[in-house]
């Protein structure tokens, strides 16, 4: 996983509340059983005028923020409350990542989406509505080591728990890290097997 | 750390599964059960295989075909979704290779994950269960800590037997009094989300309690917990009681009986503290219907549409201040992990018996939550009641709870749906979804427009 330290980019506003993962990547845009090939379907119903078109290139809606010329190459998305609600599909994070978004700044996040971000090197930052609105179309620096977001002269601190912060900063693979604790897990399991035999379905 | 020795049910389960602290202060929490479905299962299993990571305990991992399986008669691996078959065949192959239990397309036990897990006794009080599906919270109704995760976390749970978690906060929602006739568990959860917002439960495990919750049968409790994710909670949970134990005893993966004292410790101690408490007067609730594009846009069926975001009014085609009652609908759908269990179908059929849906309804469908529900309903003749009333009767699956391409409702239709999500495009491009109880769906199908089920129940 690519470590996340600091990032400076134009911040693109999609200032709506309750943007759900069906909107981020509709089910019909999840065309393969893998984690790739998703960027084209990102925000499809909003991004294209003819999202349902089956063949050939779809026509971008020039009004949609990510389609505006000043959004080109942007890596920061600004949005409202409860971003990423709905389906647990990690494809939402994979699609954002493949498109080039590395940080989402929202008023708040739905929990499964937020956890998926951490596992994929995408930084979720929660800030108040007015702060977010003021950053629209500005150049914004997100500094994870310092835990702040800077825009012009303004500096805004954001909160992130210690563990997700370390995972992102070091680009750690959670499974590799946890497997280092395997002896403790095995100990616990062999005790638990005696205490709650009904949990263990194999022999 | 808490000094008192009283604990909430959540704390008891959390503490009992606490394996160790990580170097950075999170916890390793043991995971007892993992459930996969074909939409995300193949991706997780294939990615583990590619990294040469085996499933640590395959006997505790289950997979089912529910999301994109065809629900028309005589189904096989084909689906109406373009490229959909690959999800089925690849999940099957990956499940076999990993040695996990698979409930395949035409297995007797096939059905929607959150319907079959309780049916088979895979979820039990006091266990931890995760699935890469947000409605895993449904299973908290049995007294388990059950929640939805992403694919990477599912891989993590299968490869290590634990998840790395920060401890969530706790919230208790107490429903006082008794529900009025025609008002259901679906209305209880919609009323909560309407009052406290679609983000209202963020960061919390929510315990549902109170007289109205105790009075619900086990299946209705699943409806209540099902939409904890629509409240942004990590999950919902209900303490197991005699009804729960009676429901589970002797099911295939469950103990024969729950006589051991341990099971009866699985409840919140008197005096235990929650980070937040909410009280709701259940007796004052009316049947609820969503008017907009978020579950928080829900209102009493006999009210007037409140002012919401302009986009929501525009998408749904209803201005603030208008009445919902009498709004013409095109489609009636009864299905999903929210409201397609046997008790839901029985209540819907009881209202439909001997009647016919309005001729203006362009499509009406019932999709049982599991193959077992389908068989049981047919044994009681419910399928006949539905088809004689004008509903299509299908095989089990998620079906048009969501749009995967392929099969869809007539373009731009307004649907009354017993499902859990009314997002833009959730049931297909341009489809306007109103979510409600099966009773309200039936009343509206009969009237051809949004209707109050209390008129029928009286
Ligand atoms: S029925 Fe709907 S909400 Fe439930 S698991 Fe299937 S798609 Fe998800």
Image: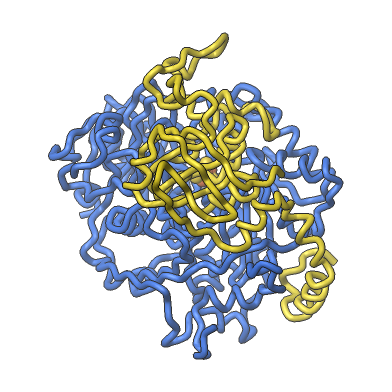
Q: Is residue B427 left or right of residue B162?
A: left
* Picture quadrant of residue B389: top left
Instruction: Out of B330 and B199, give the one closest to the viewer.
Output: B199
Quadrant that contains the C terminus of chain A: bottom right
Q: Residue furthest top?
A: A56
Residue B171 to residue B299: above or below: below
Residue B373 seen anywhere in this rendered image of the structure? no
Q: Is residue B193 left or right of residue B121?
A: left
Which chain, by letter, is yellow? A
Instruction: Out of B443 and B57, give the one closest to the viewer.
Output: B57
Residue B251 seen anywhere in this rendered image of the structure? yes
Q: Is residue B142 left or right of residue B348?
A: right
Residue name at image x 40 percent, y 34 percent: A13
* Picture quadrant of residue B159: bottom right
Q: Is residue B440 left or right of residue A136?
A: left
Residue name at image x 46 percent, y 65 percent: B204
Residue B369 to residue A199: above or below: above
Which chain, by letter, is blue? B
Residue A163 to residue B451: above or below: below
Residue name at image x 58 percent, y 33 percent: A95
Residue B211, horizontal then vertical, whole percent: 34, 74
Residue B172, horizontal then vertical, whole percent: 40, 71
């Amino acid at each position: 996983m690519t470590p996340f330290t600091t990032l400076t980019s134009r911040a693109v506003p999609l200032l709506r509340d309750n943007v759900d993962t069906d909107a981020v990547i509709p089910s019909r845009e999840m065309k393969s059983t893998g984690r790739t090939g998703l960027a084209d379907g990102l925000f499809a119903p909003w991004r294209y005028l003819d999202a349902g078109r089956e063949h050939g290139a779809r026509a971008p809606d020039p009004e949609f923020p990510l389609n505006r010329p000043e959004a080109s190459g942007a890596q920061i998305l600004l949005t409202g409350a409860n971003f990423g609600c709905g389906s647990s599909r990690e494809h939402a994070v994979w699609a954002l990542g493949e498109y080039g978004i590395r940080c989402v700044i929202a008023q708040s996040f739905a929990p499964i989406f937020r956890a998926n971000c951490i596992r994929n090197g995408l930084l979720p930052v929660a800030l108040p509505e007015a702060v977010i609105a003021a950053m629209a179309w500005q150049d914004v620096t997100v500094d994870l080591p310092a835990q702040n977001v800077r825009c012009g002269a303004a500096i805004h601190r954001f909160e992130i728990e210690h563990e997700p912060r370390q995972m992102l900063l070091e680009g750690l693979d959670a499974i590799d890290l946890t497997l280092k604790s395997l002896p403790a897990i095995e100990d616990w399991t062999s005790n638990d097997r005696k205490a709650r035999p009904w949990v263990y379905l194999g022999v | 750390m808490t000094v008192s020795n009283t604990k909430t049910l959540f704390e008891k389960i959390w503490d009992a599964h606490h394996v160790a602290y990580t170097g950075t202060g999170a916890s390793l929490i043991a995971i007892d059960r993992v459930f996969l479905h074909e939409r995300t299962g193949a991706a997780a299993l294939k990615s583990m295989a590619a990294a040469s990571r085996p499933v640590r305990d395959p006997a505790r991992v289950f997979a089912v075909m529910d999301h994109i399986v065809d629900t028309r008669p005589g189904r096989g691996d084909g689906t109406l979704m373009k490229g959909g078959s690959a999800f089925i065949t690849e999940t099957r192959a990956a499940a076999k290779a990993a040695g996990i239990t698979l409930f395949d397309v035409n297995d007797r036990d096939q059905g929607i994950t959150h319907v079959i897990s309780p049916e088979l006794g895979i979820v039990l009080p006091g266990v931890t269960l995760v699935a890469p599906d947000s409605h895993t919270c449904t299973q908290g109704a049995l007294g388990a800590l059950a929640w939805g995760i992403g694919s990477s976390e599912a891989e993590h749970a299968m490869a290590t037997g634990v998840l790395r978690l920060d401890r969530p906060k706790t919230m208790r929602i107490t429903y006082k009094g008794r529900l009025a006739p025609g008002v259901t568990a679906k209305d209880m959860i919609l009323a909560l989300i309407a009052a406290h917002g679609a983000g209202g439960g963020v960061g919390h495990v929510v315990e549902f309690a109170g007289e109205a919750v105790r009075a619900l049968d086990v299946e209705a409790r699943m409806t209540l917990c099902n939409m904890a994710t629509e409240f942004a909670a990590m999950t919902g949970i209900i303490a197991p009681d005699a009804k729960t134990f009676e429901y589970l005893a002797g099911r295939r993966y469950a103990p024969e009986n729950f006589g051991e004292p341990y099971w009866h410790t699985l409840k919140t101690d008197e005096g235990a503290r929650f980070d937040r408490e909410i009280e709701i007067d259940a007796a004052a609730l009316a049947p609820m219907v969503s008017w907009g594009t978020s579950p928080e846009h829900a209102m009493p069926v006999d009210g007037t549409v409140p002012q919401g975001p302009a986009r929501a009014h525009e998408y749904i085609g209803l201005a603030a201040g208008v009445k919902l009652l009498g709004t013409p609908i095109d489609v009636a759908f009864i299905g999903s992990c929210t409201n397609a269990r046997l008790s839901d179908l029985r209540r819907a059929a009881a209202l439909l018996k001997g009647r016919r849906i309005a001729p203006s309804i362009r499509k009406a469908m019932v999709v049982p939550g599991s193959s077992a529900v389908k068989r049981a309903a047919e044994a009681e003749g419910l399928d006949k009641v539905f088809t004689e009333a004008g509903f299509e009767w299908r095989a089990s699956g998620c079906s048009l709870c969501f749009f995967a391409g392929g099969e869809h409702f007539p373009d731009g239709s307004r649907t009354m749906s017993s499902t859990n999500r009314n997002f833009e495009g959730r049931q297909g491009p341009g489809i306007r979804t109103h979510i409600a109880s099966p009773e309200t769906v039936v009343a509206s199908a009969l009237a051809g427009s949004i209707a109050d089920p209390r008129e029928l129940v009286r």
